[in-house]
Amino acid sequence: MGVAVLSDIHGVLPALDAVLAEPEVQAAERIVVTGDIAAGPQPVQVLDRLTGLGDRVVWVRGNADRELAALAREPGREGPYALVRWAADQLRPAHLALIDALPHPVTLDVDGFGPVLFCHGTPRDDNEIVLVDTRMARWAEAFADVPDEVHTIVCGHTHMPFVRLVDRRLVVNAGSIGMPYGQVGAQWALLDHGAVALRCTAYDVEAARAAIRATCDDPGVDEWTDEYLYSRNSDAEALAVFGPGDGREG
């Protein structure tokens, strides 16, 4: 059965639908969505699709979810990123209530893993940056309040998938469904009987761009979909940009 982890969808419905069509995702007991769900060109469609899956979906808040809801309550305020003002203006009261209620972090018992903590940035902060090469001392700070019985932590936020050990704990980043760095396709992860698999689902990017264009009239939508659906930013470039955010020197 397993648990499918979908992170950083960022309002890209065609990418989400491609992953939801994967046999292993359809068979998964749970689908855990680890934040930054709707901040993008199809916020309402993505929220409605996930809501329609019922209790199989476990929701975790991301920093962009908080920011989107705050922006929706301040009409006219400029958004911090491309498309975000437009996305905030699409949300209805039910969507705001859903986002407001999102928890962070969430711990679930997963077969073969025991208790697994799912978060967005880190367990203590949905906006904290940790990377595959973050120094051990920073990881120790980020995990200081994690219960001893939790040996697996799943995160998102940085849009680059990895699996690594951190002082006997397994750390998984599922990458990004809608805004992947370094790889074209929708990135996700599967936790199944004690094993972790990082996956990337291919889909028709040009068809996705056309579908998004038909539902999003923000003037920057074509530029946005070209940059992110085609993963114009490499993982090396993203690591260079994000690296200072984990407090490293140099």
Image (spheres, rainbow, N blue to C red):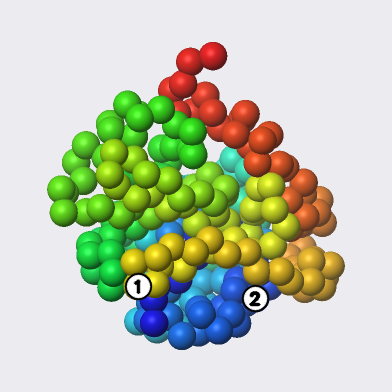
Residue 83 visible in the current orientation? no
Q: Disc 1 or disc 2, which is closer to the eye?
A: 1
Q: Quadrant of residue 216?
A: bottom right
Does residue 142 lie above or below 115 as drawn?
Answer: above
Pointer 2: what residue? 18
Left or right: 137, with 91 as reference point: left
Measure the C-alpha gap from mark 1 to mark 2: 24 Å
Amino acid bearing label 1:
His
- The x and y percentages for residue 194 are 34, 67
Reply above or below: 165 against 11: above
Position of 220 relative to 50 (above/below): above
Residue shown at the point (64%, 54%) measured from the top left = 179
- Residue 64 position, x and y percent, is 49, 50
- Which class describes the residues within 10 Å of circle 2: few (<14), some (14-19), or many (20+)? some
Where is residue 233? Give x, y as percent.
72, 42
- Which residue is label 1 attached to? 193
Q: Amino acid at mark 2?
A: Ala
* Label 2: which secondary element: helix
Residue that sits furthest to the left in the current view? 148
